[in-house]
């Protein structure tokens, strides 16, 4: 999610809303990755190498959500031991190492 990651996030600049799911795309041969909204009939090509890229995973937060930012309060929880705010998708607290309960996904 770094600005230098090669992903074109410009389409998000008009609004912070997150109506469409963003996917992580990967080119099989080079391992290059990009983030993009994926449509079923689309073909995604790395603009640098011309390789076809395949979607490999959805990125958080899952669409639709009120924000495209990963670390908004709705995507955080407090560690039961050290009370630090950590991501819902984190399995071990990065501050104290406590194993976290699985995210329920009920929200
Ligand atoms: Zn902790």
Image (cartoon, rainbow, N blue to C red):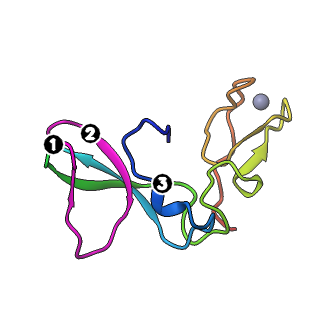
Residue 53 picture location, percent across and down: 22, 53
Q: Which image quadrant: the C terminus?
A: bottom right
Q: Label 1 near label 3: C-beta < 8 Å?
A: no
Q: Distance between the residues labelled 3 and 1?
A: 23 Å
Q: What element carries label 1?
A: loop
Q: Label 2 near label 3: C-beta < 8 Å?
A: no
Residue 106 picture location, percent across and down: 67, 67
Q: How far apart are marks 2 and 1 (CA)?
A: 9 Å
Q: Is mark 2 on a helix, strand or loop?
A: loop
Other-residue count near label 1 (Cα within 10 Å), few / some / many at <14 / 14–19 / ≥20: few
Residue under numbered circle 3: 59
Q: Residue 89 carries which label?
A: none
Drawn side of residue 73 relative to residue 65, left or right: right
Image height of 76 relative to 2, above or below: below
Q: Label 1 near label 2: C-beta < 8 Å?
A: yes
**Residue 39 part of the magenta-drawn span:** yes
């Amino acid at each position: 999610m770094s600005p230098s990651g090669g992903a074109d996030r410009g389409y998000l600049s008009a609004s912070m809303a997150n109506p469409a799911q963003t996917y992580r795309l990967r080119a099989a041969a080079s391992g290059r990755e990009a983030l993009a909204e994926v449509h079923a009939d689309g073909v995604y090509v790395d603009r640098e190498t011309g390789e076809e890229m395949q979607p490999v995973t959805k990125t958080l937060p899952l669409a639709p959500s009120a924000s495209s930012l990963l670390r908004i309060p709705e995507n955080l929880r407090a560690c039961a031991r050290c009370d630090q705010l950590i991501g819902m998708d984190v399995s071990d607290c990065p501050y104290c190492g406590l194993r976290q309960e699985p995210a329920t996904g009920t929200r």
